[in-house]
Amino acid sequence: MKILSAAQTRALDQATIAGQSITSAQLMERAAQELLFWFYGHYGHGRVPADTLLLCGPGNNGGDGLALARLLHGANYAVRVALLPADSYSADWWHNRQRLPAAVPAAEIGAEALPAISADTVVVDALFGTGLSRPLAGLAAAVVAHLNAARARVVAVDIPSGLFADAPQPAASTVVRARHTVSSGLPKLAFLLPQNAEFVGEWEVEDIDLSPQFIADTATPWHYTNAAAVAGQLPPRPKFSHKGTFGHALLLAGSRGKMGAAVLAAGACLRSGVGLLTAHIPGCGYDIFQISQPEAMCLTDAQADFISELPDLSPYQAVGIGPGLGQDAASLAVLRQLLEAAAKPLEKTGQSLPLVIDADALNLLGRHRELLKLLPENTVLTPHPKEFERLTEPARDDYHRLELLRDFATRYRCLVVLKGAYTCLATPSGELHFNSTGNAGMATGGSGDVLTGVLLALRSHAQLPAFEAVRLGVYAHGRAGDLAAAQTGQAGLVAGDIVRHIGPALAEV
Ligand SMILES: NC(=O)C1=CN([C@@H]2O[C@H](COP(=O)(O)OP(=O)(O)OC[C@H]3O[C@@H](n4cnc5c(N)ncnc54)[C@H](O)[C@@H]3O)[C@@H](O)[C@H]2O)[C@@H](O)CC1
Ligand SMILES: Nc1ncnc2c1ncn2[C@@H]1O[C@H](COP(=O)(O)OP(=O)(O)O)[C@@H](O)[C@H]1O
Ligand SMILES: [K+]
């Protein structure tokens, strides 16, 4: 699914109106109908709120609010409307102002006449949408501050008022803190960034039948990976396949005290359809590893506590390095040797050996940035934000971090998986793909090691191109976390639960 800028969203509305021969008021009515359905879904079965206040601005976001006020009134909600005064109002605002039944109380907001809001009021925030052109000030900022102070249940129409859809806010801007955001058409970039979570709350997107042709024809770097994006991407396992068909992966992982990371990554790799897996681990981990992952083969390093040797790479179709690795100088030398060896094209494919680099291997890269230029094309790096900062620089905010991410992926021609609630995969061509699956239960030690194992298996798969493999792996990892949390609850989830649900998650897609 594409994510468009605010300007492209306006053009999409216009293209829909022109392409479907409807009026802009009819499109607004569609949006309002979807909002009404959201209220039905949320407050159905006799749970209608006693007091619903619609705060309406002067543009089409306010027009949405006025149309919704009419529809909610028709559905027997007790509604009140408060109108933000302005020099001019949009045509569709006027259209819906005139259609508002006289029985609905509608008052103009003033500095001395702020609407009454209690903690029990359900407030529909329809002040400003994607047409916001500057931070809120004056009366608009005052009413939003008044709203936020009331701690009412706020449902934002399209986007919380005061929040830009695709750009950062100046510090200390006034923005509505919504409990729910109900948006039309496509998700907004702002919804996916941690810095905006306090404003956006839980969000969902309602389908208002916007022009699919315009969306297809519009270029954007931002994408949202939903089930449809990965459906059918895992190649079927042919009847006469054998363990050699699905690749032989090598995992370099573990150190004293961190063998669990190697075990988790190996388990995830095995559950993600790899044909064969060999793990190269320090000597101290032999019993631990062989007992916990009997399906994997195991090579032990000459060192007991960390990895100091790179095994012969010729048997392998992909290599993963990093989980629990530690940062010993000998392990750094192994990483360097691996990068040098992997750069040479493989005889079979003519391409470099696929690599997945995680955790301490990323930290080593960050401390020795001269190694970055050795990264083979399409290498997969899986940093969390702190690891990414060590590879680049501290980001000013989440938007700046996305810029750094895009620059890094295009500069080093690699696939960077910036992990988080909406994990963002950056491609060598500069696309950013935000993942839709996963939950806060996965914020627990070892979840990232599991992702490394999943990606290693999918990068070993000869039939999966690099980008598709990584996008699918990130999606399936999050989905496995969701399936696990449905059984354990989020607090009770441990990384091993994600491993156990990767099979079903991959089966779904
Ligand atoms: N165009 C359409 O037909 C549709 C539009 N929709 C709604 O329309 C919204 C976009 O409407 P608009 O483009 O009219 O924009 P808005 O309603 O977001 O606001 C635009 C108005 O606010 C003023 N303004 C912007 N920033 C301000 C600020 N900081 N302080 C004071 N005034 C400010 C502008 O000068 C303009 O008058 C969407 O978010 C969505 O809610 C939906 O109804 C779907 C259909
Ligand atoms: N709040 C969250 N919502 C969704 N996914 C999450 C959340 N927190 C963490 N995750 C996922 O869990 C994994 C954590 O990885 P990482 O930080 O490397 O953990 P570790 O180093 O302990 O393995 C990532 O894939 C991340 O996307
Ligand atoms: K709004």
Image (tube, rainbow, N blue to C red):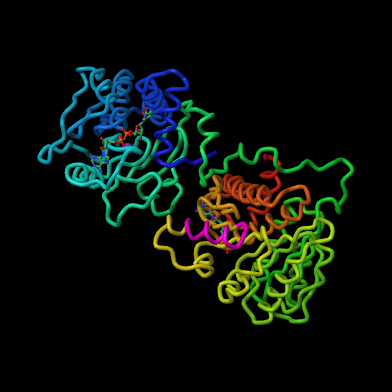
- The answer to whether residue 301 is left or right of residue 170 is right
Q: Quadrant of the N terminus?
A: top right
Pick out the residue farthest to the right.
240
In magenta, the rendered stretch is: 402-415
> Could you say which quadrant of the image residue 165 lies in?
top left
Instruction: Point out residue 461 in the picture as x, y percentages from the top left corner.
Output: 76, 52
Query: Where 212 sits versus 482, above or below?
Result: above
* Ligand 3 image-quadrant field: top left
Residue at the (80%, 73%) spot, across then down = 311
- The answer to whether residue 352 is left or right of residue 214 is right
Residue at the (54%, 57%) spot, across then down = 419
Q: Is residue 170 magenta?
A: no
Q: Is residue 405 magenta?
A: yes
Residue at the (38%, 25%) spot, across then down = 36
- The answer to whether residue 143 is left or right of residue 408 is left
Q: Quadrant of the C terminus?
A: top right
- Dominant secondary-structure state across the stretch colored magenta: helix
> Could you say which quadrant of the image residue 54 lies in?
top left
Instruction: Point out residue 309 in the picture as x, y percentages from the top left corner.
Output: 76, 77
Please state the total of marks drawn on the protein image: 0
Query: Where 232 sits versus 345, above or below?
Result: above
Instruction: Point out residue 358 in the picture as x, y percentages from the top left corner.
Output: 62, 65
Instruction: Point out residue 214 in the picture as x, y percentages from the top left corner.
Output: 50, 31
In the image, 292 versus 331, the foreground residue is 331
In the image, 430 versus 473, the foreground residue is 430
